[in-house]
Image (cartoon, rainbow, N blue to C red):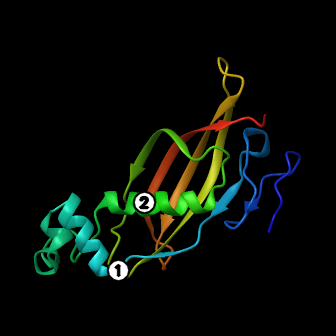
């Protein structure tokens, strides 16, 4: 496990790190890697039936003749799984408080995919009006077991300073 000290250079931060990180502990270039999440077919169908009931998410036969060429998870399910993986791998003090995000889904997520997330900090700004916090921009890639990007997200997070 890597200890994150304010004087450390950017680098990998393991998902199991028990410490909570503050603005002073973060550097542009820091990388966070999550564990894996297996998306089961039944879970994909249940989510789609409840939240995004389109045939390419809910019906394998209809999905086969769709743009996706087979059953595909809702992008919102992929985003939800990504959030779950981020919560377990980016140990920010006070939690992951989102201020906004831009999301794209370049490849479909399929039943049986094993998803993982790699997040890189790309910008860190101190707040001019609130000295107890700053804004951190993270680029998070959700990858399947073949290394294909199934979601790309750039998000801004509010991160507190150490008290």
The percent position of residue 54, horizontal first and vertical second, equals 14, 63
Q: Residue at x 55, y 58 (%)?
A: 86
Q: Of residues 71 and 148, which is closer to you in this image? A: 71
Judged from the image, the secondary structure of the residue bearing numbered disc 2 is strand
Q: Is disc 1 in contact with disc 2, using a CB cutoff of under 8 Å?
A: no
**Eyeballing the image, is 43 above or below 26?**
below
Q: Residue at x 68, y 46 (%)?
A: 93
Horizontal relation, residue 98 to residue 3: left or right:
left
The residue that mark 1 highlights is 40
The residue that mark 2 highlights is 151
Query: Quadrant where the N terminus lies?
Result: bottom right
The percent position of residue 36, horizontal first and vertical second, equals 53, 74
The percent position of residue 142, horizontal first and vertical second, equals 48, 64
**Eyeballing the image, is 21 above or below 126?**
below
User: Is disc 2 surrounded by few (<14), some (14 to 19) or many (20+) residues within 10 Å?
Assistant: many
User: Is disc 1 surrounded by few (<14), some (14 to 19) or many (20+) residues within 10 Å?
Assistant: few
Query: Quadrant where the C terminus lies?
Result: top right
Judged from the image, the secondary structure of the residue bearing numbered disc 1 is loop
The percent position of residue 56, horizontal first and vertical second, equals 17, 69
Could you tell me how many numbered marks the image carries?
Answer: 2
Question: Mark 1 or mark 2: which comes first in sequence?
Answer: 1
Q: Of residues 93 and 154, which is closer to you in this image? A: 93
> Looking at the image, is mark 1 or mark 2 nearer the viewer?
1
């Amino acid at each position: 496990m890597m200890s994150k000290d304010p004087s450390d250079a950017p680098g990998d931060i393991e998902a199991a790190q028990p410490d909570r990180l503050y603005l002073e502990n973060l550097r542009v270039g820091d990388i966070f890697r999550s564990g894996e999440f297996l998306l089961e077919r039944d879970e994909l169908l249940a989510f789609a039936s409840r939240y995004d009931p389109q045939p390419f998410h809910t019906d394998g036969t209809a999905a086969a003749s769709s743009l996706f060429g087979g059953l595909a998870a809702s992008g919102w399910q992929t985003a939800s799984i990504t959030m779950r993986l981020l919560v377990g791998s980016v140990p920010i003090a006070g939690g992951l408080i989102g201020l906004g995000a831009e999301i794209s889904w370049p490849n479909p997520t399929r039943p049986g995919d094993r998803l993982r997330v790699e997040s890189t900090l790309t910008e860190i700004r101190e707040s001019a009006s609130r000295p107890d916090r700053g804004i951190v921009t993270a680029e998070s890639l959700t990858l399947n077991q073949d290394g294909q990007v199934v979601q790309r997200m750039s998000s801004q997070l509010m991160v507190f300073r150490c008290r």
